[in-house]
Image: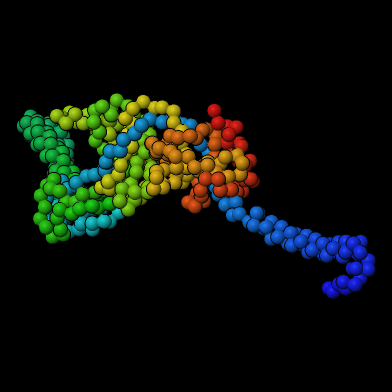
Amino acid sequence: MTWNLKSINENGLPGLAFCLSVVLSVFGIWGAGVSRAQGADAEPAASGGPPPAPVETGEVTRVRLAPRSPFIGTVVSPRDARLGMEMQGRLDFLVEVGERLKEGEPVARLNEKVYRLEVAAAEAELRGLESLLAFQGRELERMRQLAEADNAARKLLDQVKTEQEQVQSRLQAAQVRLDLARDRLSKTTLYAPFAGVVAEHFHSVGALVKEHEDLLRLVALEGLEVSARIPAAVSDYLREGMRLSVLGLGARRAVERSGRLRAVVPLGDASRLYELRLLLEEKTPWKVGDAVRVLVPRGAPRQVLMVPRDALVVRSQGMLVYKLDGRGSVVAVPVQVGEVQGDRLEVRGEVAVGEQVVTRGNERLRPGLPVRVRGGGEAGVRGSRGDAGAP
């Protein structure tokens, strides 16, 4: 823009004032536009913080729980038997190791030839005596008829009666021998006394085995139990029928089941130990001989606060949980961990019953970060409910 000095001189100060007002108006309009542009750019920056992190939560609860100590136990079968034959002979049949058997199925069999011959001989003897007894009966009837007219025949009658009684006794003895022979024959086959699996062999087919000599080991697979030894002091807090937690070891360390306490038996030796037997009523992946841990109470029950296991976050400075603060964000609470019960664990720290702690999505949280509870509305609503339930 060009201004003529002549016009300014002619018009004087009023003309100069008018020109200045025009220039200031132009700069004022430009500055307002810049300010609005800067404000528009700054507004996204002010509202451009991280979005609420999606999380899942669990509730802090109070339960009655006794302090517990782990003891190593072993999965055992209530029926573990070494089976043998009641007769001696050559082994013709023996089930394979690992084969599962039902109760009453054949397990082993001896060669039956000799025992069948014994049965055949006893049957033949019995038939001969039955024939002799029948002859004695006919002879006795004939002697009775002769004795009515002849005194000499009376003496023969008594003799025939005696012989008949002797044959009857021999017949009874032959029947017993036949029964024994048949019983010995039946015992050449060994049957499973209970359902189970063949765990071990002590002889092979073709071997000559003796009476009551161990042939194999049969282990029941149903009604498995856990056997563990505990000190006498701990046994004071046990009672039959109570349930104890059983944890796996090694590859099955994540497995947890409960067992019903069937018996606590003093061993009666210098060790002053007790053996406890737990009945595993639930289906388990454990097998006979597997090692497990049994959590045994070592004190009286007490009231404790518990949170889901997934709520625990391990940091370099210690363990903590994130709880909702009722204002849409989270607070980090350092805790100490105590007893474990199923998928929950005892914590000691600044948490209260009813408060909500983050169980999913807590790996990258930090104090004050806004969160959004999945499927549960705003975090502030969930947090306020937890505060209302706290004592």
Residue at the image point whose x is 21% and y is 49% from the top = 217
Q: Is residue 381 left or right of residue 87?
A: right
Residue 272 image position (x, y, % from top left): 19, 29
Quadrant that contains the N terminus: bottom right
Residue 105: x, y in percent? 29, 51
- Choose between 156 and 62: the one closer to the eye: 62
Answer whether residue 146 is visible to the viewer in this image. no
Measured along the vertical axis of the image, is residue 32 above or below residue 70? below
Q: Quadrant of the C terminus?
A: top right
Looking at the image, which residue is at 54% across and 40% down? 356
Q: How many marks?
A: 0
In the foreground, 218 or 226: 226
In the rendered view, tell whether residue 172 sits above or below residue 5: above
Residue 321 visible at all: yes
Q: How is the image coloured?
A: rainbow
219 or 31, which is in the foreground?
31
Relative horizontal placement of residue 9, taking residue 106 as reference (left or right): right
In the rendered view, does 346 fall on the left or right side of 361? Answer: left
Q: Measuring 93% from the left and 66% from the top, which residue is drawn there?
A: 11
Instruction: Write down the quadrant of residue 267 in the picture.
Output: top left
Residue found at x 83% / y 65%: 23
Of all residues shown, which one is farthest toward the right?
Answer: 11
Query: Viewed as shown, does residue 298 lie left or right of 113?
Result: right
Residue nearer the viewer, 266 or 341: 341
Q: Pinpoint residue 83: horizontal percent, then vertical percent.
A: 19, 47
